[in-house]
Image: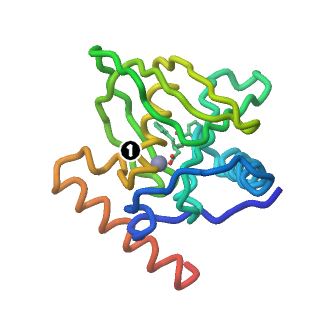
Amino acid sequence: MTLRPILIHPDPRLKKVADPIAEVSADIRKQADDMIETMYDAPGIGLAAPQVGILNRLIVMDAQRDPEAKPNPMVLINPEVIWESEEKNVYEEGCLSIPDQFAEVERPKMVRVRWLDVDGKTVEEEFDELWATCVQHEIDHLNGTLFIDYLKPLKRQMITRKMQKLKREMARGK
Ligand code: K1U
Ligand code: ZN
């Protein structure tokens, strides 16, 4: 497995709509394995393909809270929200592409999602609480949307400027 570098906002690849995956091939399974390793290494509870510069519709997640539990990553290919609850939930979100920045985002509390698994089989499942927040955050990445797009323009600008500064420092090797 290979660790993939995670893109930092602002980057035009994080604003593109990703392409559907036509066939669940060995290359796609390798991409999923690499993304799982990259997510755990970060560490994070989710990761979407555009965050590692691949513009296809694959996400990985493991949002279990119990640190004692065995890792149980999920791979979702071409995920689609097919139902969302009217009830909302507010969660303080973070993003591996926007390091050390957190903000409250309101989203549907529960969602039903359909996707293809790594065997190309169609799966449907309902997600609640943090899992629901995470899957919506990751599907947003596939559509070029970041959690800061839900914030007021001034707050979004402030975070974007901080990220531009961070990228300049990283480029200078600071
Ligand atoms: O997509 C991403 O950038 C990953 C992101 C997912 C996410 C976090 C919070 C709410 C919604 C979606 C992260 O994983 S940020 C890191 C994080 O939340 C975390 C890291 C270590 C332990 C627990 C949480
Ligand atoms: Zn993110």
Amino acid carrying label 1: it is: Phe
Q: Which residue is mark 1?
A: 102
Residue 100 vertical placement versus 116 (above, below): below
In which quadrant of the rendered image does the C terminus lie?
bottom right
Of 108 and 92, the residue lying toward us: 108
Q: Mark 1: which secondary structure?
A: loop
Residue 67 vertical placement versus 139 (above, below): above
Residue 84 vertical placement versus 73 (above, below): above
Q: Local crowd at mark 1 within 10 Å, few (<14), some, or many (≥20)? A: some
- Residue 109 image point, x, y percent: 37, 19
Residue under the point 68% across and 51% down: 35
In which quadrant of the rendered image does the N terminus lie?
bottom right
Residue under the point 66% across and 38% down: 75
Of 102 and 88, the residue lying toward us: 88
Residue under the point 42% across and 70% down: 11
Side (left or right) of 85 relative to 28: left
- Residue 102 image point, x, y percent: 38, 44
- Residue 36 image point, x, y percent: 71, 46
Name which quarter of the figure residue 10 lies in.
bottom left
Task: Tally the numbered discs.
Answer: 1
Name which quarter of the figure residue 6 lies in.
bottom right
Residue furthest out toward the front: 22
| Ligand 1 closer than 8 Å to label 1 CB | no
Name which quarter of the figure residue 27 lies in.
bottom right
Residue 138 vertical placement versus 28 (above, below): above
What colouring style does the render use? rainbow
Residue under the point 58% across and 62% down: 54
- Residue 133 image point, x, y percent: 44, 30
Residue furthest out toward the right: 1
